[in-house]
Image (tube, grey):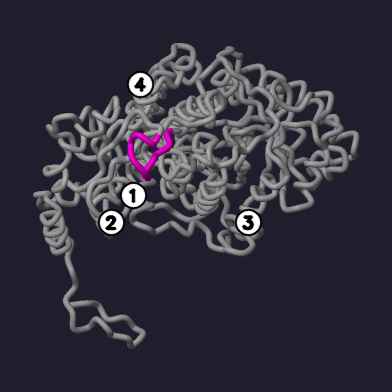
């Protein structure tokens, strides 16, 4: 029987407890009604969602799915947080990125909620000679500064330390990170760098600046090259271990070496996967520290950045929603610092409105949603705990593979890591092409008449190493072809939707078709006749029953009216006069590309 609570509200006292088997039987019944014959575990599998890295999200989690003991915040294995107090004392550090030498923007951010600065310096960023000007008026003892200087890291670090001394900031008051990441820079540029060159910075920080870190383990290059969550974790772990070896060989203890590292991860709109990834990352680094004989030093410091890969260039306003979910996930996942990329990040330099929305995203979640009041609010969820555990194992396995092949530097230089990431991205690209992974405003519900958002070009980012991919890139190429056609001819390529029967019979499929072709910049025409539409191709839209009665005759009529190609919206069948079929799960990118080719829209 149901266990009675102690509150006296025995509302379910007369009902027996349900079992997992009973629930499975109900699932089987629902599946049978939908035409699927599955029983037992297969029924549950039919409702599961396959993720990358061989993982799957099941439809139901119970106490039997509880993972291993996760401990408490501030204690190994640090799954529930690196610090005992978490972010409860004031929320996470709101870190804004700057790559332009604009002091007014820096001060404006700090005056309106930003608590630390992430400065891109040198190639593709702020000129080193302008660093002092950019930080003019900044209280360097209050606002931590994090550098991202690539090959110029040593010169940038010297300049920043000079500014601290010139402004009278005590060494013990300095906070931030010098941002040395030679392997991350190699991943970005393909230029090999000796890790040992940055060891003196770490030695100096350990000796003179107790609150300043010297190295960043940046996992963004692997995420932006199309890597999965486990690959991002494994590559970051391999990088961190490489740095740990160098620092301890130079004379630092494991505790001192760990204190020189900060880890940077991508936060995506996949809320639960991001939460689990950050929790798994702390567990994995705690394991490394434990193996190195310093279990208490494994409290990983995390900087989460909203994913550049998920940012779309079309309908960029939707990026605000993506960034909000990603920021929520980063906060719930326990990130120490969070950077929200502005919604127009993919278009160039953000404007004032975009920067304000970016910083206010964190402010609202902290101050109004009170997201940081509870430490690890996802902890105890059977789903999150199981996903954390599975992701940690997958990340550890990828890390071990890197170590077997000689370490992070070796797999970067051999091309092995690039091949792994490319394979993952190829599989994901197919899901994007088939719209199994929808992109709102791009592959789903595109808006052809939207006014383009224009921004000043951003500095050219370092390149030459791993590629930088975006989810929208295939659809962006299609839309660019349509835009060029519009500019050259005054009209977009068109397709005629030949609806058959009543609105009830054709609306579902005509809506599907309109969305599909607009994703490629092809304007659907639903009014009037084919002859008056200005289109050269047409799509039949109706129910299966009406297709049996009228598909052939309608296709013949369209061909007689001049249609060069006739589609049918529905599963492939054998209808005379129908040239091809479009349906949920078809390769939309291939369909749209070949359609534009036939229409004479140049690539």
In-image side of 182 versus 307 (left or right): right
- The reply to whether dot 4 and dot 1 touch (C-beta < 8 Å) is no
Secondary structure beneath dot 4 equals helix
- The reply to whether dot 1 and dot 2 touch (C-beta < 8 Å) is yes
In-image side of 506 versus 358 (left or right): left
Q: Residue 526 colored magenta?
A: yes
Q: Please give the name of the residue rendered at 52% of the width and 25% of the height, measured from the top-left corner.
A: 489
In-image side of 161 versus 453 (left or right): right
* Residue 147 position in % (x across, y down): 70, 32
Labels 1, 2: front one: 2
Residue 237 appears in the rendering: no
Kindly identify which numbered label has been placed on residue 598.
Answer: 4
- The reply to whether dot 3 and dot 4 touch (C-beta < 8 Å) is no
- The reply to whether dot 2 and dot 4 touch (C-beta < 8 Å) is no
Structural distance between the alpha carbons of marks 1 and 2? 9 Å
Provide the residue span drawn in magenta: 522-533
Structural distance between the alpha carbons of marks 3 and 4? 55 Å
Q: Which residue is mark 3?
A: 91
Which of the 4 image quadrants contains residue 172? top right
* Residue 339 position in % (x across, y down): 62, 43
Labels 2, 4: front one: 4
Q: Which residue is mark 2?
A: 61
Instruction: Bin the neighbour count of mark 1 within 10 Å (Cα to Cα): few under 14, some 14-19, many 20 and up.
Output: some
Query: Which numbered disc flags the more N-terminal residue, 3 or 1?
Result: 3
Q: Residue 239 colored magenta?
A: no
Instruction: Bin the neighbour count of mark 4 within 10 Å (Cα to Cα): few under 14, some 14-19, many 20 and up.
Output: some
**Which quadrant, please, contains the N terminus?**
bottom left
Structural distance between the alpha carbons of marks 2 and 3? 30 Å
Q: Does 314 appear above or below 192?
A: below
Which of the 4 image quadrants contains residue 179? top right
* Residue 355 position in % (x across, y down): 69, 45
Q: Which residue is mark 1?
A: 386
């Amino acid at each position: 029987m149901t266990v009675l609570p102690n509150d006296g509200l025995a509302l379910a006292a007369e009902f027996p407890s349900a079992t997992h088997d009973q629930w499975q039987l109900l699932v089987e019944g629902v599946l049978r009604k939908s035409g699927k014959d599955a029983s037992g575990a297969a029924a549950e599998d039919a409702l599961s969602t396959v993720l990358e890295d061989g993982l799957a999200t099941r439809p139901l989690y119970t106490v039997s799915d509880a993972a291993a003991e996760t401990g408490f915040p501030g204690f190994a294995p640090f799954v529930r947080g690196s610090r005992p107090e978490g972010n409860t004392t004031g929320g996470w550090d709101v870190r804004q990125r700057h790559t332009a030498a604009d002091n007014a923007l820096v001060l404006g951010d700090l005056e309106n909620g930003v608590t630390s600065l992430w400065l891109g310096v040198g190639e593709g960023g702020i000129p080193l000679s302008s660093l002092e000007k950019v930080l003019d008026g900044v209280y360097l003892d209050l606002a931590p500064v994090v550098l991202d200087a690539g090959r110029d890291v040593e010169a940038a670090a010297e300049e920043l330390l000079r500014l601290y001394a010139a402004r009278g900031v005590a060494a013990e008051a300095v906070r931030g990170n010098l941002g040395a990441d030679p392997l991350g820079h190699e991943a970005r540029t393909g230029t090999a760098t000796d890790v040992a060159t940055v060891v003196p910075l770490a030695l100096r920080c350990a000796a003179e600046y107790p609150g300043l870190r010297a190295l960043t383990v940046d996992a963004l290059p692997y995420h932006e090259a199309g890597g999965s969550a486990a690959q991002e974790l494994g590559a970051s772990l391999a990088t961190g271990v490489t740095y740990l070896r160098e620092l301890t060989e130079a004379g630092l203890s494991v505790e001192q070496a760990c204190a020189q590292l900060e880890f940077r991860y991508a936060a995506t709109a996949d809320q639960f996967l991001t939460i689990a990834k950050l929790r798994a990352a702390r567990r994995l680094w705690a394991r490394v520290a434990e193996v190195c004989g310093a279990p208490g030093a494994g409290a990983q410091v995390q900087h989460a950045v909203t994913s550049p890969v998920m940012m779309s260039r079309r309908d960029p306003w939707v990026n605000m929603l993506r960034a909000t979910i990603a920021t929520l996930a980063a906060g719930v996942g326990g990130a120490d610092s969070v950077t929200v990329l502005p919604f127009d990040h993919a278009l160039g330099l953000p404007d004032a409105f975009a920067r304000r929305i970016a910083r206010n995203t964190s402010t609202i979640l902290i101050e109004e949603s009170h997201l940081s009041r509870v430490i690890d609010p996802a902890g105890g969820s059977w789903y999150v705990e199981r996903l954390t555990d599975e992701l940690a194992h997958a990340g550890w396995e990828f890390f071990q593979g890197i170590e077997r092949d000689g370490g992070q530097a070796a797999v970067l230089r051999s091309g092995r890591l690039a091949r792994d990431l490319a394979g993952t991205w190829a599989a994901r690209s197919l899901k994007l092409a088939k719209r199994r992974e929808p992109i709102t405003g791009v592959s789903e519900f595109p808006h052809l008449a939207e006014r383009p958002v224009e921004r000043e070009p951003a500095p050219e980012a370092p390149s030459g190493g791993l590629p930088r991919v975006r989810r929208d890139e295939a659809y962006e190429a299609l839309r660019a072809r349509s835009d060029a056609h519009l500019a050259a001819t005054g009209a977009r390529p068109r397709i005629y939707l030949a609806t058959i029967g009543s609105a009830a019979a054709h609306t579902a499929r005509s809506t599907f078709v309109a969305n599909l072709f607009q994703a490629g910049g092809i304007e659907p025409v639903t009014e009037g006749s084919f002859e008056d539409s200005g289109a050269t191709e047409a799509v039949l839209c109706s129910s299966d029953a009406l297709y049996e009665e009228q598909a052939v005759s309608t296709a013949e009529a369209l061909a007689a009216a001049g249609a060069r190609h006739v589609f049918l919206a529905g599963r492939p069948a054998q209808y005379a006069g129908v040239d091809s079929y479009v349906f949920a799960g078809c390769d939309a990118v291939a369909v749209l590309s070949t359609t534009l080719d036939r229409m004479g829209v140049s690539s």
